[in-house]
Image (tube, grey):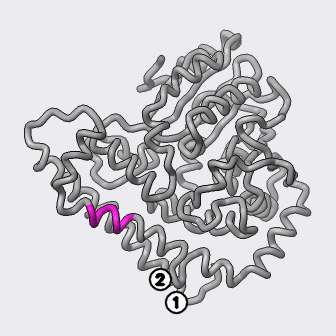
Amino acid sequence: MAQDRRAVAFQDFILDCKIRWMTQVHPALCAEYRTLKGKRTVTTAAQAGRILAASGLFPFYQWFERHIQRQKISGRWGMATFTAAERARLEARMAEAERSGLLQLDPSVAVPDYYAAIDTHQIPGNLTTDSLAGIVYKRIAASTQPPNTERYTLHERFAEFAAERDDFHHIVDLGCGFGKSTITLAQKFHAANVEGVDISAPCLRVAAAEAAEAQMRNLRYQQRDARRTGLKSGDYDLVTSTMVLHEMRPEDVRDTIDESFRLLAPGGTSIHLDFRVADPLLAFLHATHGRRNNEPYMAAINAMDVVGAHRKAGFTEIEVVPFAEADGATDPDFETWRLPWIAFIARKGNVAPKARAKAAGSGRGRDRR
């Protein structure tokens, strides 16, 4: 972002607000909830929500989070506002990305009506209408959960997480967005062929521009629907997604899992990094976070039998593994607000015995289903 001092100061202020909400307001709300709850037994998010109805802090908690996001994007010096002022320069950069040879766009790819109808993350027009939406998304993503999302730290950890399981050679990243997970996978598996697919042309242009500037040679992007990519069956040994499933309806999640199975060669691995939370209070706050952030399927994916969907698709050796975006983030006494990342890992059958033994040797602390 160009150094307009007013915009930089505004975004720094918004970032400080987000950190205060995460590190002070959220723990204070949790403490108030424990006081209100007393000795009552609470087993569901709905019960936790009814207890919070008596909270004096919860209305402010909700208002503060929603308006931090709104101002970050659409305020006077919000990212959408500021990015639009750079339109000519940025669109020229995106045009260069299309000529890089790293990107294949397909205007015939249809955006699902239910997705197009929502300004996801409060981005005006979602990620598919404005040609600069991908740039806005990349800029706001850096402060989703500071400091772990400031650059690609979380996605570098995800690439390491994948590398602990095998040395993959043909990888496809579904719903790759602006390429934050795809480029880190390509850098980690530098001998592999890595492909990123997404329905958003604006995001794919950003991804291709970054890949071209980094002189990546093992990475390509295509505009395709993650539910039905049209890619060759059985051609990949790793299928991934990061923070994609929760933005889909449950039936589309099932289609994406089915597609992951189809794309994999026998013995291949699927890793979908998304969200899951069991604690009633945190489940309620997670669902309401989704509503505040225009991500309406948060609660549905949390309630969905994702393991069963993998099993029905044909997967075996299904695991559910908490994912720590930073050291200590999954500890029970971690009080700062965080997204409850979880990895759904599944293997397609007919794996070679040697590879099976290697996978079993790296299975510490996993929930095998």
Observer-nearest of 15 and 298: 298
Badge 1 element: helix
Q: Tell me the residue at 28%/58% (across/down).
A: 26
Q: Tell me the residue at 17%/62% (across/down).
A: 56
Q: Measuring from the top left, give residue 71's x and y in whole percent.
A: 47, 75
Q: Measuring from the top left, give residue 274's x and y in whole percent.
A: 52, 41
Q: Measuring from the top left, give residue 60's x and y in whole percent.
A: 27, 66
Q: Is residue 162 magenta?
A: no
Q: Measuring from the top left, give residue 343's x and y in whole percent.
A: 51, 34
Location of residue 102 (image quadrant): bottom right
Badge 2 element: helix
Specify the segment rendered in magenta.
Answer: 59-65
**In this figure, which residue is indicated by the disc labeled 1?**
6
Q: Tell me the residue at 44%/54% (across/down).
A: 291
Identity of the amino acid at label 1? Arg
Q: Tell me the residue at 83%/75% (across/down).
A: 92
Q: Main secondary structure of the magenta part?
A: helix
Identity of the amino acid at label 2? Phe
**238 relative position to 107: left or right:** left
Q: Is residue 62 magenta?
A: yes
In space, the residues marked 1 and 2 are separated at their CA atoms by 6 Å
Q: Furthest residue to the bottom?
A: 5
**In this figure, which residue is indicated by the disc labeled 2?**
10
Q: Are marks 1 and 2 in contact (CB under 8 Å)?
A: yes
Q: Residues within 10 Å of mark 1 (few under 14, many from 20)?
A: few
Q: Residues within 10 Å of mark 2 (few under 14, many from 20)?
A: some
Location of residue 197 (image quadrant): top right
